[in-house]
RNA sequence: GGGCGAUUAGCUCAGUUGGUAGAGCAGUUGAUUUACACUCAUCAGGUCGCAGGUUCGAGCCCUGCAUCGCCCACCA
């Protein structure tokens, strides 16, 4: 009879087991694909399988969304490893520039009442680095607690020296190709954070605003409407639709007016962008303070008059308005219009106000000198392995993003996100990449008088000063699939593991990140960064609400792991969760899978105490017809579960495993075998014992990617001659 | 305003090519010195949002509508 360890006679206790098992894996070295080859586990010519972990921000701790991400990827990775692939899961963390800096700044201001300017660049950076390091350590321990089998020997950080070299190399290449340019444009300026932000970092809040309809002066012929009266000081034109018969006689004329004490020169222009049905059908054009007006100004050669500064205060030379906040200036102008009888109408309308995602500041469009990535500018693609783009041909960055998905070089799961993706690409404008914050990759450009130098290192000679700005955090994360593998050097890793197989991430960062990775990999390497994009949805609470600090409804994955075991948490996150769709998690659901783990534990105890001297090495005895039938059923399940895993249907694979193990194996097979196990019919008994042990072993193997800890623990006590770890056990084939 | 998705048992959700509606939780009734009460069996519960269409056959395909959710744009 097999030896039964004492612990098997008690209910399964996850917390003490999981930490020990993880240590066992780490010591084995099997997270590292080269170690697997050295130890003869993986064939040297095995097909590679790579996933890079989307690097969590070093802004705090992990939430359930991260836990889902880690679990899903770990399932794919463990499945691939057991199937003999050269499997690499490369971990890392993201410096998350603006998010991290604003968090640390807030903390410092709260505790010490000091701003970043009180501390200075060097001291603030020192504080941020310290915070990032602590946050990093917490995050890594959390990732490990959830069982992630990633190769820590290759761990990377988006702001370390190796990644900085990759960032500077791409920047210089793009600069030389004319794809990174410095120019004046309207930017989204966050007066609170004192930095530009990208279009994607804006969140719209619906508020009520007053729409004023007025004339600049008594003799000005066309009334206009606006909610932002204070910007009208910067107007240089009034635009009407070319077909609007009401105003045609005025088009092309110039007017000099004095508006609230400020002289303005207003030209009447015709532009198709104007909606004749809105307001008066005439638009006051403010090129300095509106994206659309800026573009209109470019088309018509209008002067740009800036009247608002970086602190959202007025800059005009007028005693009433100078240095007033925009909101105060609006009141002053409204009062003046009333007094002068120029105000025709005031009405309350709902309006979407642009606010900065990280600071909550109201975004002020301002013209500023910034660095941009030109997405529509043609360049010569020297080397391309991308279907639809020939080496040496002219293309654009936007084209790369489009073609890779359109030609199925990249598949997005679920498929319908491809439509959303294309829609976004169509509307994409140039990407503003410079940020006026201190934490991040410094722009690799130096200035001296009128000279400008772009390079990997500071230029020689005196008097050069580096650009003060840093890069948008997504610039460095967009290089992630290849900067982590040693690029710009032609490393062995890069040759073997790139392009990666799967990018698994949240659907909300399809544009922020996924699209930009496709752009950068296409540009820098001429390849796709990955072949499949697997998107997961948001993990919500039991009532379907987003988990948030303010609601206090967050579930900490570590609490879950301690209370129910990481295995139970993993299973609860995966079962019933379809790609791209939001899911709900509750302690009840996790508890159900803790019960499942215990069921496996108990069934193993039963099998081991009833199989006599049968081991996994025992040759297959003559099986009874019923046992043959049972094995055929198992084969069907094995085939189906394998197919589900191959096709990213993790929810179905998990459910089928759960159902087979509990309601077929435990409830039916074990129950019906009980009499045979205690009978005198030796042939029937041997058959039953052999079949029981092999069904159990097969299930433990197939469950391993989902619940790695308990399966590894049980595998260690299954009777067999040669002991080895389950993590590298070959994936079961049908009998 | 444009796009995308969802609507299936009391709740949360599956349902891969069209072929007799499924699971978990909750509920009913019962069992039991049991591998396991973190158990087992049993029952109940659904005109698959609504209206049309295609088909021998539709939860699944097509059209329209309703409600909810998300994304993008931002009309000044």
Image (spheres, coloured by chain):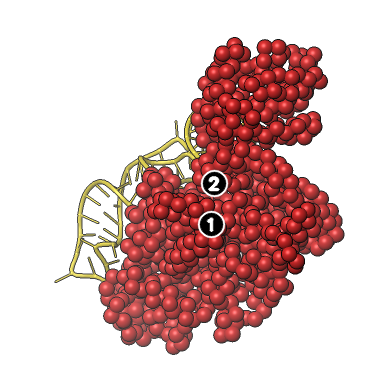
Chain colours: A red, B yellow
Tell me which residue sits at (73%, 64%) in the image: A462
> Crowding at label 2, few (<14), some or many (≥20) Cα neighbours within 10 Å?
many
Q: Position of residue A672 (x, y in %)?
A: 34, 69
Q: Residue furthest right?
A: A392
The image quarter containing residue A444 is: bottom right
Write down the quadrant of residue A282 in the picture: top right
Q: Which type of secondary structure does the marked residue at label 1 adopt?
A: loop
The residue closer to the viewer here, A288 or A333, is A333
Q: Which mark is residue A552?
A: none
Q: Nearer the viewer, mark 1 or mark 2?
A: 1
Residue A272 in sight: yes
Image x and y of residue A164, in percent: 64, 65
Return the residue nearer the eye: A394 or B67: A394
Q: Is there one chain holding both mark 1 and mark 2?
A: yes
Q: Which chain's residue wears label 2?
A: A
Q: Is residue B20 above or below residue A325?
A: below
The residue beneath circle 2 is: A193
Q: Earlier in the sequence, mark 1 or mark 2?
A: 1
Tally the numbered discs. 2
SS category of the residue bearing label 2: loop
- Viewer-proximal residue among A265 and B48: A265
Query: Which residue matches tag 1?
Result: A120
Give A581 or A620, whichever is nearer the viewer.
A581
Tell whether A461 sits left or right of B75. Answer: right
**Mark 1 surroundings: few (<14), some (14-19) or many (≥20) residues within 10 A:** few
Q: Position of residue A369 (x, y in %)?
A: 70, 46
Q: Chain of mark 1?
A: A
């Amino acid at each position: 009879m097999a030896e039964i360890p004492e612990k098997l006679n008690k209910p399964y206790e996850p917390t003490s087991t999981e930490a020990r098992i993880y240590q066992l894996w780490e010591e084995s070295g099997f997270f590292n694909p080269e170690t697997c080859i050295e130890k003869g586990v993986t064939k040297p010519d095995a097909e590679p399988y790579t996933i890079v972990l989307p690097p969590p921000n070093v802004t705090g701790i992990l939430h359930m969304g991260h836990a889902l991400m880690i679990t899903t990827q770990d399932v794919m990775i463990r499945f691939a490893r057991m199937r003999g692939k050269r499997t690499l899961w490369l971990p890392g963390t993201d410096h998350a520039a603006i998010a991290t800096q604003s968090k640390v700044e807030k903390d410092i201001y709260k505790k010490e009442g000091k701003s970043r300017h009180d501390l200075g660049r060097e001291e603030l950076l020192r504080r941020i680095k310290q915070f990032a390091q602590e946050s990093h350590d917490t995050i890594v321990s959390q990732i490990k607690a959830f069982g992630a089998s990633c190769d820590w020997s290759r761990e990377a950080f988006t702001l370390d020296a190796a990644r900085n070299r990759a960032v500077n190399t791409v920047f210089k290449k793009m600069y030389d190709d004319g794809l990174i340019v410095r120019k004046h444009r309207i930017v989204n300026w966050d007066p609170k954070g004192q930095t530009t932000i990208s279009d994607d970092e804006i969140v719209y809040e619906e508020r009520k605003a007053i729409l004023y309809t007025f004339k600049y002066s008594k003799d000005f012929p066309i009334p206009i409407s606006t909610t932002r009266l204070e910007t009208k000081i910067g107007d240089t034109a009034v635009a009407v639709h070319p077909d609007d018969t009401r105003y045609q006689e005025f088009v092309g004329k110039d007017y000099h007016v004095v508006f609230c004490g400020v002289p303005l020169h207003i030209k009447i222009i015709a532009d198709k962008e104007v909606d004749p049905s809105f307001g008066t059908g005439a638009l006051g054009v403010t090129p300095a303070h509106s994206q659309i007006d800026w573009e209109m100004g470019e088309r018509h050669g209008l002067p740009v008059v800036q009247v608002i500064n970086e602190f959202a205060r007025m800059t005009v030379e007028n005693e009433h308005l100078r240095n007033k906040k925009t909101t105060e200036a609006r009141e002053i102008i409204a009062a003046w219009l009333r007094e002068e009888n120029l105000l025709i109408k005031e009405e309350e309308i709902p309006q979407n106000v642009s606010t900065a995602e990280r600071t909550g500041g109201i975004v002020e469009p301002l013209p500023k000198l910034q660095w941009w990535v030109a997405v529509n500018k043609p360049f010569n693609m020297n080397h391309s392995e991308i279907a639809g783009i020939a080496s040496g041909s002219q293309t654009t960055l936007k084209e790369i993003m489009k073609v890779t998905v359109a030609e199925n070089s990249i598949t997005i799961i679920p498929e319908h996100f491809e439509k959303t993706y294309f829609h976004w690409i169509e509307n994409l404008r140039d990407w503003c990449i410079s940020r006026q914050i201190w934490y991040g990759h410094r722009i690799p450009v130096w200035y001296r008088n009128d000279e400008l130098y772009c390079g990997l290192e500071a230029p020689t000679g005196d008097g050069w000063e580096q650009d003060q700005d840093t890069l948008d955090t997504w610039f460095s994360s967009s290089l992630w699939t290849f900067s982590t593998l040693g690029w710009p050097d032609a490393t062995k890793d890069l040759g073997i593991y790139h392009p990666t197989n799967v990018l698994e991430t949240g659907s909300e960062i399809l544009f922020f990140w996924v699209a930009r990775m496709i752009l950068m990999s296409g540009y820098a390497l001429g390849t796709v960064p990955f072949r499949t994009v697997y998107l997961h949805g948001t993990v919500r609470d039991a009532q379907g609400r987003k988990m948030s600090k303010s609601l206090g409804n967050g579930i900490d994955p570590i609490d879950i792991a301690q209370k129910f075991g990481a295995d139970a948490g993993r299973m609860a996150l995966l079962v019933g969760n379809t790609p791209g769709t939001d899911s709900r998690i509750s302690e009840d659901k996790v508890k159900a899978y803790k019960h499942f783990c215990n069921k496996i534990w108990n069934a193993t105890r039963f099998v081991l105490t009833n199989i006599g001297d049968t081991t996994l090495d025992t040759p297959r005895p003559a099986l009874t017809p019923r046992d043959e039938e049972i094995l055929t059923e198992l084969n069907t399940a094995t085939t189906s579960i394998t197919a589900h895993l191959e096709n990213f249907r993790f929810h179905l694979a998990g459910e089928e495993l759960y159902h087979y193990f509990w309601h077929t194996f435990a409830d039916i097979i074990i129950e019906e075998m009980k009499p045979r196990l205690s009978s005198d019919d030796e042939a029937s008994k041997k058959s039953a014992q052999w079949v029981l042990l092999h069904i159990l072993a097969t299930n433990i193997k197939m469950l391993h990617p989902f619940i790695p800890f308990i399966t590894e623990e049980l595998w260690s006590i299954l009777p067999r001659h040669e002991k080895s770890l389950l993590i590298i056990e070959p994936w079961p084939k049908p009998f």
